[in-house]
Amino acid sequence: MLAMLEEIQKGHSLEVIDLLYDYCADIIFGCLGLGIDEDDLIEAMRDARVAQRRR
């Protein structure tokens, strides 16, 4: 995820990066707080990324 944010940072403002980082952190900590296993969360994020690329 950090690599993605760094890539976005090259062409966008720091405000956008801060919002994206905060949003991602909220999602991750929210899922972990609900008891979702970290490995399951990472796999779900990979699956979502693959699905998005196929669109």
Image (cartoon, rainbow, N blue to C red):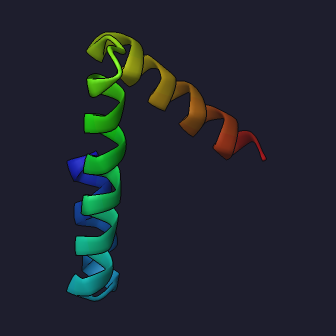
Instruction: Quarter of the image for the N terminus: give it.
Output: top left
Picture layout, residue 40 above or below residue 44? above
> Where residue 49 appears, x then y in whole percent?
55, 38
Residue placed most toward the observer, 41 or 36: 36
Picture layout, residue 35 above or below residue 33? above
> Where residue 37 appears, x then y in whole percent?
31, 11
Picture layout, residue 46 above or below residue 43? below
Q: Quadrant of residue 5?
A: bottom left
Q: Residue at x 27, y 16 (%)?
A: 38
Q: Give the number of callouts.
A: 0
Q: Quadrant of residue 29?
A: top left
Residue placed most toward the observer, 55 or 29: 29
Q: Residue at x 36, y 15 (%)?
A: 36
Picture layout, residue 8 above or below residue 2? below
Q: Residue at x 50, y 23 (%)?
A: 44
Residue farthest front in this picture? 34
Compared across the picture, whether 40 is left or right of 3 comes to: right
> Where residue 31 appears, x then y in whole percent?
36, 29
Q: Quadrant of residue 48?
A: top right
Compared across the picture, whether 40 is left or right of 21 comes to: right
> Where residue 55 appears, x then y in whole percent?
78, 47
Residue farthest right in this picture? 55
Residue placed most toward the observer, 25 or 30: 30
